[in-house]
Image: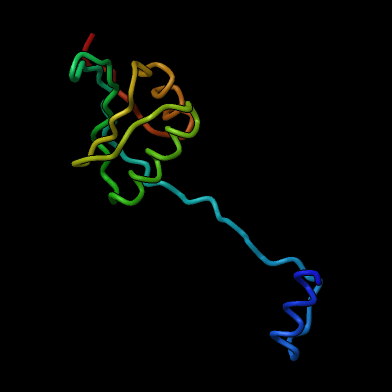
């Protein structure tokens, strides 16, 4: 007995529709600010990290930006206390990416 037959027995009144479900994802617009975001390099526990601070929008937007950066560059990282912490030294790549999205950036440290 197939899964479809089992479901028909459980829900005899249900009619199957062949229309595709609408899963429309809208591109979320990020707040573009006047002050530059600061990209800095630090060593934490002996490991290189890239830290991005200075976003003036809401934290949810900054979290989305952190997720985009982590997915784009296939790196690990986190969002804590209003800053994005990325594992490794990716300042140049991240700054270029942010500038393409319309943000101003400033390089700090090393």
Q: Name the side, left or right, on which 27 lies relative to 34.
A: right
Q: Name the side, left or right, on which 80 lies relative to 23.
A: left
Instruction: Give me the residue at 28% from left, 39% from top.
Output: 79
Residue pushed farthest top?
110
Residue 49 figure quarter: top left
In the image, residue 100 lies at what x, y percent?
48, 29
**Nearer to me, 64 or 104:** 64
Q: Quadrant of the N terminus?
A: bottom right
The answer to whether 57 is drawn above or below residue 38 in the figure is below
Q: Name the side, left or right, on which 97 lies relative to 60.
A: right
Instruction: Give me the residue at 74% from left, 77% from top.
Output: 6
In the image, residue 58 lies at what x, y percent?
29, 51
**Nearer to me, 56 or 73:** 73
The answer to whether 62 is drawn above or below residue 24 in the figure is above
Q: Quadrant of the C terminus?
A: top left
Instruction: Give me the residue at 75% from left, 85% from top.
Output: 9
The answer to whether 17 is drawn above or below residue 89 in the figure is below
Residue 94 figure quarter: top left
Residue pushed farthest bottom?
13
In the image, residue 77 lies at what x, y percent?
34, 32
Q: Name the side, left or right, on which 70 lies relative to 2.
A: left
**Nearer to me, 11 or 106:** 11
């Amino acid at each position: 007995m197939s899964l479809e037959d089992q479901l028909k027995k459980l829900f005899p009144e249900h009619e199957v529709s062949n229309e595709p479900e609408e899963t429309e994802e809208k591109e979320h617009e990020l707040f573009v600010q006047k002050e530059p975001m600061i990209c800095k390099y630090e060593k934490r526990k002996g490991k290189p990290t890239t830290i991005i601070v200075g976003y003036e929008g809401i934290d949810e937007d900054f979290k989305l930006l952190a997720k985009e950066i982590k997915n784009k560059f296939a790196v690990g990282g986190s969002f804590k206390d209003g800053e994005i912490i990325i594992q490794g030294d990716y300042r140049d790549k991240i700054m270029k990416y942010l500038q393409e999205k319309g943000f101003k950036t400033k390089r700090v440290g090393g």
